[in-house]
Image (spheres, grey):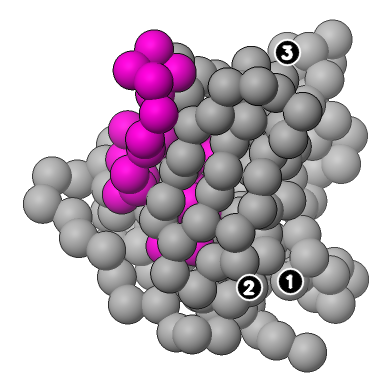
Amino acid sequence: MTAFAQAERAALADALLAAGPDAPTLCDGWATRDLAAHLVLREHRPDAAAGIMLKPVAGHTRKVQDGLAAGDYPALVERVRKGPVLLRPFDEAMNVVEFFVHHEDIRRATPGWSQRPISRGYSQSLAKNAQRTARLSARRFPARIEVGGPDVEAFTVNPKQERTVTVTGAPGELVLFFSGRQSSADVSITGDDDLVARLRGARLGI
């Protein structure tokens, strides 16, 4: 059993503390305190977590998240670091992408960021998740998307579409791209200009 999510959880908590509560993130409208509150809500408040995906209860989710964000910041980050004990066996399945993406949301919101080293094992885990993320988040894009790159087994999204665009990058960059961080992901995109522009500006993410 791997523990990439647990290691990333610790790194994410460190980044949250180092940045402080009011630092920018790539999440539109969220400072670091809001991001930390989202992570705590997701794992500790099942009554409110449904609103992350379901619009009818999104108001309740915002209210709970705002309340968490307004509290003691170091204590909030400590809750992120510890996580719920009962869910720890599922940490890898639930959080390996979540924590990687949100760690980069903090890092890449600051000018001068650079890609960090990723171990081969972690890279392979992200590569598998990149495929799942892409197929879910870009399933409505009106073209075939051919995806590949270093340490990535080539795969196709929307194979029945006639027109084609190609996205190439390292596993972590592909995860970020298909999680809706197109402008901050280091990938190359080739294809017809209109498709490339449309994919760069598409509302991706899950």
Q: Residue at x 49, y 32 (%)?
A: 165
Name the amino acid, label 3: Gly
- 159 horizontally vs 102: left or right: right
Q: Is residue 66 visible?
A: no
Which secondary structure, mark 2?
helix
Give the answer, above or below, for where 85 lies relative to 40: below
Name the amino acid, label 1: Glu
Badge nearest the viewer, 3 or 2: 2
Which residue matches tag 3?
59
Q: Residue at x 58, y 22 (%)?
A: 163
- For the residues labelled 2 and 1, say whether their Cβ atoms are less than 8 Å apart: yes
Residues 100 and 64: in front is: 100
Quadrant (top left, top right, bottom left, bottom right) of the C terminus: top right
Which residue matches tag 2?
125
**Seen from this angle, which residue lies furthest front?**
162
Which secondary structure, mark 1?
helix
Let me know if residue 182 is in the magenta part: yes
Residue 92 marker: 1
Residues 6 and 164: in front is: 164
Give x and y (percent) for residue 121: 56, 85
* Crowd rating for badge 2 (residues with CA inside 10 Å; few <14, some 14–19, many 20+): some
Give x and y (percent) for residue 126: 58, 66
Residue 14 marker: none
Give x and y (percent) for residue 124: 58, 76
Give x and y (percent) for residue 122: 54, 78
* Crowd rating for badge 3 (residues with CA inside 10 Å; few <14, some 14–19, many 20+): some
- Earlier sequence position, callout 2 versus callout 1: 1
* Crowd rating for badge 1 (residues with CA inside 10 Å; few <14, some 14–19, many 20+): some
Badge nearest the viewer, 2 or 1: 2
Which secondary structure, mark 3?
helix
Quadrant (top left, top right, bottom left, bottom right) of the N terminus: bottom right
The residue stretch that appears in magenta: 170-196
